[in-house]
Every structure is written in structure tokens, then in C-alpha cells.
Image (spheres, coloured by chain):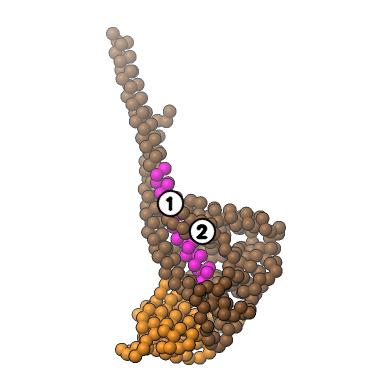
Chain colours: A orange, B brown
Amino acid sequence: MRTLTVSVVTPDGPVLEDNFEMVSCKAETGELGILPGHIPLVAPLSIGAVRLKRDNGIERLSINGGFMEVRPDKVTILAQSAELPADIDIERAKEAKSRAEGRLQSKQDDVDFQRAELALKRALNRLDVGQ
Amino acid sequence: MASLRDIKGRIDSTKKTKQITKAMEMVSASKMSKAELNAKSFVPYGEKIQEVVKSIAANNPDASHPMLEKREVKKTGYFVITSDRGLAGAYNSSVLRNLYQTIQKNHQSTDEYTVIAVGRMGYDFCRKRGIPVAKSILGIADQPNFSEIKELASETVQMYIDGEIDELNIFYNHYVSAISQQVTTTKLLPITDLKATGSTSEYEYEPNQEQILNVLLPQYAEALIYGALLDGKASEHAARMTAMRSATDNADELIGDLTLSYNRARQAAITQEITEIIGGVAALE
């Protein structure tokens, strides 16, 4: 089976670099699945989970904004933050979730609303990947 | 001449100061190596994002985006990175002097510029001199992570997109080595230095070029700001380490001088006592 080199880098340092058979992630326009030999591509990513598949299972990562660069044998994900399930602080994500929900309930101006919405998305994503 | 007790007191207090500066030197040395490591781990991200931005710009010479275009400069933004605390030698003063000179040279009124300050020293400096500060962030950790600066960076980029400022310059200390830091001024926005580099591969864009640039360019600018901050932090610790080392050296020298005059004073006192005793004996005979 042919593989792709996947590297995930954030401003705080590289998170992961390894070979996988398939990458699927959530781009801003919808789900994208990348197999080896894909044409060069650049796509922005939304907040979501990235699934990396290889023969002994699937690895999941929580990604928070950024974009991916695809070359035939290499995928680079540049994210503002990225966490492996083991690195996710579930308690903190839960707190962030309830905080964001509270903020969404109370009527506020647009900017705060958007911010709370994003925070909620991030928290849900972390919980989703972490559990 | 100072009394023996006075000199003794000064020697003791200098020794205590020396202990503190010595400790601070060692603390800064360890922080510096960590900060250096942080700056290094940022490099792959910085390089990659630059590579992608450049290759997009190179493949699409007609790509247009507000962040790529020069416009008439009505208001300039200065992004200044300083530390929260002093005791770092010329670290803050050289950046701030450079900033002040630039402002004096290029602007007549305070409407023409604004400062975005990182660190208390820069903030206080601007406030004291009546330089307008649009945004500031104080109390950045010694080993900052991206989320701390993210908000300020994206707000700054937003200021440019909204047309509040028409260019953005960044002032910080570039970390050359442990003993040398250099004040660096870079024009961050508009992004102009995107000349094609070696590897240019044709990309597909999903959904399209314009949207990609909308996402990518702010991220690129934020990454540059974060890179400068990490660089600045490494310089800060290096500058503090050097400053504290020379303070320790000076304390050593001072202690040496004081010990010498202490011994002299002691000897003088002994001599005087002997003279008095001999004088007393002579008077009795």
C-alpha cells in the first residue's frame, strides 16, 4: 500500500510526522479525503477532526483553523493549534464548552457572539477527539 | 575616612546584591535556552507558510488582495516588542530609542501613527511621551505560546484590513547570539517581499485563490508577529543574562576594592592604638 508523509506543524512546534495511507479532514468547503498521488492542492481547514488512516487503525487529531498543503507524496497541515487525543485536557474543554454556551445564551453584540460560537466549536471538537 | 563598621556594612550588602544578580543570571540562562528552543520549533511553521504564500504569489502574479497592495500611507502602525521588567541592559532602551527616532523623523502629528505595544516597558514609554497606543498586551509569559499573542496579532492585522492603519512596521530585538542582539525593523504589512523562490509547483485551490489568500495572508502576518515575539523573548533573556553577568562581575570588583580599604582601615586603627600605648608609656617614664 502506498503511503503519504503527513506532517502537522503549529507555531508552537511540530505535532506529528509519520506515514499514513489516507488523510481525511474538514476543509471550509466540506470534507476532503486525500490519497497518495493527489495533485498539488491548497485548502483552508475549518475547526474539526483530522483522521489519519493506516493499516493498524485510525489516528485522530483535533485541528483548530489553518490550512493544508498537498503534494503527491506529502501532506502538510499548518494549523494554529493541533492536539493529539492524549494531549487534550478534557476537563478544560468541558469548562470552555459551558462557558461558551453561557455566553451564547446571554444576548450580546455580534463580535462576542461570533467569538463564543468559535470557542464552542473548538471545545466540542476537542471533546469529540479526546473521548 | 569611613569607619570599619561602615565598610563592613557595604561589603555585606554588595555580597547580597551579588548573590541576587548571580541567581538572576542563571535563571535567565536557563530561560534563554528554552526560548531559543521555542524560536527553533517555530521555524518549520514559519518556513512552510512562507513557502506556500510565496508559491501562490509566484504562480499568480495578478493575484490581488488588500494585504498585498501598497496604498497611500495616512497612518502608520508600529508594533513594538519590549519586556515587562527592566534589568536587561540596553534591551528595551535600544528598541525604544529606535522607535522614537523613527517617529520623530517621519511624523509631524500624533494622528499619523499609532503604536501597538507588547510589554510594560514599551507601553509606559509611549504613555509618558504622549505617543498614542492603540493596543497593548502586558504580562506575556517567558515562554509564550501562540494563543497568548493570537488575539493581539489578529486584531492588529484586522486594523490594517479595516484601513485604520495603512502600513505596519515591527520593532524588536533580533537574537543573533547569547551576547549579541540587534534592533530590527521590518515592514510587515503590506506584504511586499514575495518574489518567487526556487520551488514553484502549481497548486489546485479549494475553493478558489481569493478565499485561500483571505485565510492565508492574515495567518502569515500573525505567524510573522509570533516569530518576532519569540525572537524578542530569546533576546530578552540573553540581554538579561549578559546584564546580570556584568553586574556580578562589577560586584566582585567592588567587593575587592572595599576589602582592600577595610584592611587598610583596620591596619591604621591598629597602628594608631600601638602609637597611643607607646605614647602613654613614654609619658609615664
In terms of depth relative to the viewer, which is nearer, B11 or B110?
Answer: B110
Residue range in magenta is B223-250
Magenta stretch, main secondary structure, is: helix
Chain of the residue that carries numbered disc 2 in the rendered image = B
What residue sits 49% from the left and 85% below the top? Answer: A40
- Residue indicated by mark 2: B173
State left or right for residue B69 relative to residue B139: right
Bin the neighbour count of mark 1 within 10 Å (Cα to Cα): few under 14, some 14-19, many 20 and up: many
Name the secondary structure under disc 1. helix
Look at the image and tell me whether residue B60 can be seen: yes
Report x, y in % for residue B126. Answer: 60, 58
- On residue B28, the disc is none
Label located before the other in sequence (2 or 1): 2
Chain of the residue that carries numbered disc 1 in the rendered image = B
Q: Amino acid at mark 1?
A: Thr
* Magenta-drawn stretch contains B237: yes
Image quarter of residue B195: bottom right
Look at the image and tell me whether residue A61 can be seen: no
Q: Amino acid at mark 2?
A: Asn
* Magenta-drawn stretch contains A19: no
- Residue indicated by mark 1: B242
